[in-house]
Image (cartoon, grey):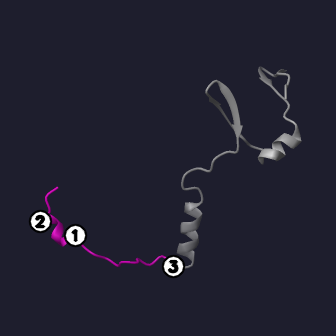
């Protein structure tokens, strides 16, 4: 499909037909990168560890955050050679 690149403020833009966006699962936000001389539009990737803070809060609120191995010291570590 050929599209026209049009002025859009101080930039340029194209109109992407809704069926094409639906075909690749894009709605409101996309990631735009240049790969091998081509513009690539894709679904945004989730940030690493996204949602971990909320999950940790939920575990703490449920009081399910006891240590699995319990406390232990490093008494024997002083004999190790690093």
Labels 2 and 3 touching (C-beta < 8 A) = no
Q: Are marks 1 and 2 in contact (CB under 8 Å)?
A: no
Magenta segment: 63-82
Q: Is residue 27 visible?
A: no
Q: Which residue is mark 3?
A: 64
Position above or below: 60 against 6: below
Residue that extends furthest to the front in the rendered view of this protein: 1
Q: Which mark is residue 79?
A: 2
Q: Is residue 7 magenta?
A: no
Q: CA distance from mark 1 to mark 2?
A: 10 Å
- Secondary structure under tag 3 reads loop
Q: Where does label 1 land, which residue? A: 74
Please report whichever mark, 1 or 2, sits nearer to the chain's N-terminal start: 1
Image position of 61 (left or right of 74): right
Whether residue 55 is visible: yes
Q: Give the number of the mark in front: 2 or 3.
A: 2
Quarter of the figure that contains the C terminus: bottom left
């Amino acid at each position: 499909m050929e599209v026209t690149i049009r002025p859009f403020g101080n930039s340029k833009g194209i109109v992407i037909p809704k069926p094409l966006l639906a075909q690749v699962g894009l709605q409101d936000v996309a990631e735009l990168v240049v790969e091998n001389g081509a513009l690539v539009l894709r679904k945004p990737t989730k940030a690493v560890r996204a949602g971990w803070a909320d999950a940790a809060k939920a575990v703490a609120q449920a009081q399910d955050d006891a240590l699995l191995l319990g406390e232990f010291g490093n008494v024997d570590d002083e004999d190790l050679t690093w």
